[in-house]
Image (cartoon, coloured by chain):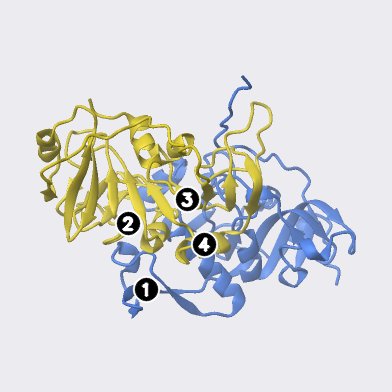
């Protein structure tokens, strides 16, 4: 089944104000930067964004924050972003902080038809407030519910016309689970190839989870913390 | 003399054992990778999705797609593996990682840890810390004994929002190595030149002091 759309404009059709959007990536690594750019252009507002991080001030989801397009962030770590902090402390932005592993599993569960699951993460902390606690093997766990989204937007290294995806290195991160959990999943890829060119043994995300795929026009791939050593 | 951050990392490195998979947090814990004792093999997991994390890349060879959980550019060693975030935390929650080393703002005598939030001041989020401390059997906290204001970080009870309860087993600070058991800190070793009295004075929580408290031995070459 051909999932290819021509460009980011077509890919994001139907994305409207007040929707819940999942966006793949960890820090600035593996984020769908073309789609984020288009969301800024479209000026869609009131968004609930589920993403492990919130970008930096002038890149990634930080661009949507600057335009005040995000109503609520669901994340595990939101440091490195002054505008985020300002909006959160002033109450303009709702924030739901979730342990990283629980966030990943809640997305996976959402895509896998598992409505909720127990995890030890967050027991005894404010994350557990209002959640059911149950002991398994003598250890307390809390009940966490699945997450889904109107749109999931992921970024892959290679994709084919069927929507099969291969990610590169640690740019995989949240992308596969979010691809599963979107009612409509959009994949932006660096290389888009005809069906048959990717080895089926090496597919990370099978095309069944992807509704639209397009080749991103430009990937800046900004590095958040450039750490190097010198050749001695 | 109390230890600097490097000293704390060196002492924690002595806790590494052959064949372990290890998750190192941001800050002092990251330095532990520089002092793996000779003759043992450990593999580092970074929760954003790599096993077999290597050193920083050479200048000019950095890859935006290859970072650690601190968002720093890294390299992958021979035999490394990449995986998604759900798989990564399956490794952690499923107790396939033998040791977690992380920093803390406060640790209590029953092993509670606070390291993610200062109400009204700092709200960056917990990242993977809550999953790590809730699941790992072997958690070592690396931190300074006192905070910047000079107050003890080893407390009867944490005052900051908790990251996890009853989970820390060992704390290595600039002054001492302490185990946590039976709801108390137990002094195990003191930093070179640091007296037991200094450690007692710097510890707000209940501290059990054995008759003999050996001084740490750093820079041992093991074969």
Instruction: Please report the residue visible at 50 percent of the width from the left and 44 percent of the height from the top.
Output: B40
CB under 8 Å between discs 1 and 2: no
Q: On the same chain: label 2 and label 3? A: yes
Q: On the same chain: label 1 and label 2? A: no
For label 3, the crowd category at 10 Å Cα-Cα, with few meaning under 14, some 14 to 19 and many 20 or more, is many
Q: Nearer the viewer, mark 4 or mark 2?
A: 4
Task: Supply the letter of whichever chain is blue.
Answer: A
Element under label 4?
Answer: helix
The residue where tag 4 is placed is: B91
The residue where tag 2 is placed is: B163
In the picture, the disc for residue A15 is none
State which chain disc 1 sits on.
A
The residue where tag 3 is placed is: B22
For label 2, the crowd category at 10 Å Cα-Cα, with few meaning under 14, some 14 to 19 and many 20 or more, is many
In percent of width and height, residue B80 lies at 64, 49
Label whose residue precedes the other's in the sequence (4 or 2):
4
Element under label 1?
Answer: strand
CB under 8 Å between discs 1 and 3: no
CB under 8 Å between discs 4 and 2: no
Task: Look at the image and give the colour of chain B.
Answer: yellow
Element under label 3?
Answer: strand
Q: Based on the displayed image, in which of its 4 quarters is residue B184 positioned? A: bottom left
The residue where tag 1 is placed is: A142
Is A103 in front, or is A229?
A229
Instruction: Please report the residue visible at 86 percent of the width from the left and 68 percent of the height from the top.
Output: A2
Q: Residue furthest top?
A: A232
Label 1 – label 2 distance at C-alpha: 14 Å
Label whose residue precedes the other's in the sequence (2 or 3):
3
Label 2 – label 3 distance at C-alpha: 20 Å
Element under label 2?
Answer: loop
């Amino acid at each position: 089944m051909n999932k290819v759309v021509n460009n980011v404009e077509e890919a994001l059709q139907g994305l409207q104000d007040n929707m819940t959007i999942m966006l793949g990536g960890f820090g600035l690594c593996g984020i769908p930067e073309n789609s984020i750019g288009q969301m800024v252009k479209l000026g869609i507002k009131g968004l609930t964004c589920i993403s492990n991080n919130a970008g930096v001030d002038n890149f990634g989801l930080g661009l949507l924050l600057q335009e005040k397009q995000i109503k609520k962030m669901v994340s595990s770590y939101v440091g490195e972003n002054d505008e985020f902090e300002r909006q959160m402390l002033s109450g303009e932005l709702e924030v739901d902080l979730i342990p990283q592993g629980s966030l990943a599993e809640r997305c996976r569960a959402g895509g896998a038809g598992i409505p909720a699951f127990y995890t030890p993460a967050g027991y005894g902390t404010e994350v557990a407030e209002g959640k059911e606690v149950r002991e398994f093997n003598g250890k307390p766990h809390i009940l966490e519910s699945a997450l889904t989204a109107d749109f999931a937007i992921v970024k892959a290294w290679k994709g084919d016309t069927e929507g099969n995806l291969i990610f590169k290195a640690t740019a995989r991160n949240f992308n596969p689970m979010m691809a599963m959990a979107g009612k409509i999943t959009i994949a932006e890829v660096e290389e888009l190839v005809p069906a048959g060119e990717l080895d089926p043994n090496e597919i990370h995300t099978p095309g069944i989870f992807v509704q639209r795929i397009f080749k991103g026009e430009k990937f800046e791939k900004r590095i958040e913390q450039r750490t190097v050593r010198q050749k001695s | 003399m109390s230890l600097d951050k490097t000293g704390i990392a060196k002492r924690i490195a002595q806790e590494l054992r052959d064949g372990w998979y290890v998750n190192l947090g941001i800050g002092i814990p990251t330095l532990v990778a520089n002092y793996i004792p000779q003759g043992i093999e450990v593999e580092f997991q970074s929760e954003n999705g790599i096993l077999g994390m290597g050193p920083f890349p050479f200048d000019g060879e950095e890859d935006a797609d290859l970072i650690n959980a601190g968002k720093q550019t890294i390299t992958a060693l021979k035999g490394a593996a990449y995986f998604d975030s759900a798989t990564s935390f399956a490794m952690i929650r499923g107790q396939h990682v033998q040791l977690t080393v992380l920093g803390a703002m406060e640790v209590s005598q029953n092993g509670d840890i606070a390291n993610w939030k200062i109400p009204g001041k700092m709200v960056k989020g917990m990242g993977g810390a809550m999953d790590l401390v809730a699941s790992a059997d072997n958690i070592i906290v690396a931190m300074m004994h006192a905070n910047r204001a000079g107050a003890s970080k080893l407390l009867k009870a944490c005052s900051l929002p908790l990251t996890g309860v009853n989970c820390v087993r060992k704390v290595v600070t600039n002054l001492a190595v302490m185990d946590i058991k039976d709801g108390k800190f137990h002094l195990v070793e003191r930093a070179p030149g640091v007296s037991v009295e200094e450690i007692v004075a710097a510890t707000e929580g209940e501290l059990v002091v054995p008759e003999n408290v050996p001084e740490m031995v750093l820079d041992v070459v093991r074969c």
